[in-house]
Amino acid sequence: MSTIRCPICLRMFEPDLRKLYQLNDQGDPIPLVVPPGIDEVEFEERTRNALVLCPSSPPGQPEAHYLQRDFTRYKQPIVIGLVGAKDTGKSTLLATMIQEIDTIGLHDYGLRARPLVDDKHQNFRRDYLDQLITNRRTLLGTPAAREGVQFVDGFLLIEGNDVPQPVVFFDVGGESFTNIKDDKLIQFIQTFTALLFVVDPDRATARPPNADWTFNAVSNRLTGPGKYLDKPTAIVLTKADKLRFEPTVARWLTEQGGILTRKCGEVCIDHDKMREESRDIFGFLYQREAAWAYLPFSTFLTCTLHAVSATGTSAPKPEQPGSATDPRRTYLRPLRSRRVLEPLVAILAMSGAITLPGADRVGRR
Ligand SMILES: Nc1nc2c(ncn2[C@@H]2O[C@H](COP(=O)(O)OP(=O)(O)OP(=O)(O)O)[C@@H](O)[C@H]2O)c(=O)[nH]1
Ligand SMILES: [Mg+2]
Ligand SMILES: [Zn+2]
């Protein structure tokens, strides 16, 4: 790793991996002293959750901030931002994606994934997954972005003996993206190296139209040369269980075959099938005149479209809104996610992290 962009202040810097920090019991960073003469295994264990200082502010200053060492010492991180208005289903989608990485893994795609920061991963499981999967309750709305907002969880992708690559996820309350009055609050958008645009089917099929302006706001915020923005992007029609009577969507939602094939004589990514799904979901959105939803397709160089359901079922709204003290609702049936990993696999293929044959064709026009 040479230089890296700080996701908090956007500064590019070369991390000093010899000066490590750790959090004390009060949660304050203090220098991490490693005894000399220990071997690699012990060093790795002792420094598992180590931090490095971002050089934009010296330690002790109120603006001083630290990054996870493992975010900074490997290949350039893939920083995935989930974009969409309030209630579109971003956090629920992310939760079920992470659950599938934890339980099924990415081995089929040639990668081993381990949590990037153990504490963060435990917190994510507690705040998102215990609620959703164990208690079968809807998630609380995610708080709006604060200054210095950090990723919520991440993994280290390990492929053979190659240098590992971190992949991290930003999940903020949907209202954050349209709060363009305060630049500092949304500068984290500039750290996204890949984007998941999450489409709520209720908005896509609404009459009169109910466009999600976060897609436009985030795309406008990003800059780059050329006709297209060069960041891997997936448009995810989530909550697709609500569209199960729409033949095009139902076809993909019930698709069992996965996106691996042996057509090429060995295991490879079925980019033709992914293109077919993208074309169908694009057609579905086009027919409903939801131009805002497929805008990323004409803005980004590589883009796929997907139909997924994070929960497979809805949680009914209370008959008298506001009467309940706890806004979390209970899902009607046991949760069953469908095809939630596909958009992530597409992003990893477009980012070059998945190297199976065919991966380099994903999302190309
Ligand atoms: N039917 C169905 N409903 C879903 C699904 N995913 C989410 N929902 C519903 O959508 C609501 C909002 O989901 P969240 O994941 O909290 O939405 P969000 O985009 O994170 O919202 P903010 O954090 O407020 O920006 C949930 O409470 C569920 O009621 C799904 O796959 N199917
Ligand atoms: Mg949320
Ligand atoms: Zn910084």
Image (spheres, rainbow, N blue to C red):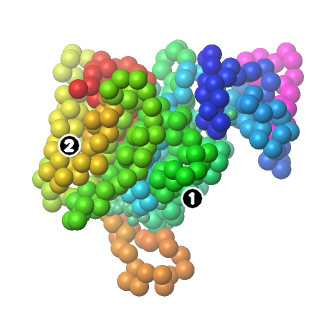
Numbered mark located on residue 8 in the image: none
Where does the magenta region start and end? Answer: 29-43
> Closer to the camera, 333 or 180?
180
Residue 334, x across and y down, in percent: 37, 63
**Does 39 sit left or right of 192 as displayed?**
right
N-terminal of the pair, mark 2 or mark 1, is 1
Q: Look at 27% across and 44% down and name the residue there.
A: 294
Q: Nearer the viewer, residue 121 or 142?
A: 142
Q: Which residue is mark 2?
A: 282
Q: Residue at x 51, y 64 (%)?
A: 140
Which residue is identified by label 1? 143
Residue at the (40%, 79%) spot, across then down: 318
Q: Is residue 267 visible?
A: no
Viewer-proximal residue among 301 and 25: 301
| Kind of residue at disc 1 | Pro
Q: Amino acid at mark 2?
A: Phe
319 falls in the magenta region: no
Q: Nearer the viewer, residue 233 or 45?
A: 233
Label 2: few (<14), some (14–19) or many (≥20) C-alpha neighbours in 10 Å: many
Query: Image check: 143 left or right of 208?
Result: right
User: In this rendering, is residue 188 above or below 210?
Assistant: above
Residue drawn at x 45%, y 31% is 223
Q: Position of residue 58 (x, y in %)?
A: 82, 32
Q: Quadrant of the C terminus?
A: top left
Identity of the residue furthest to the front in this view:
181
Does dot 2 land on a helix, a strand or a loop?
A: helix
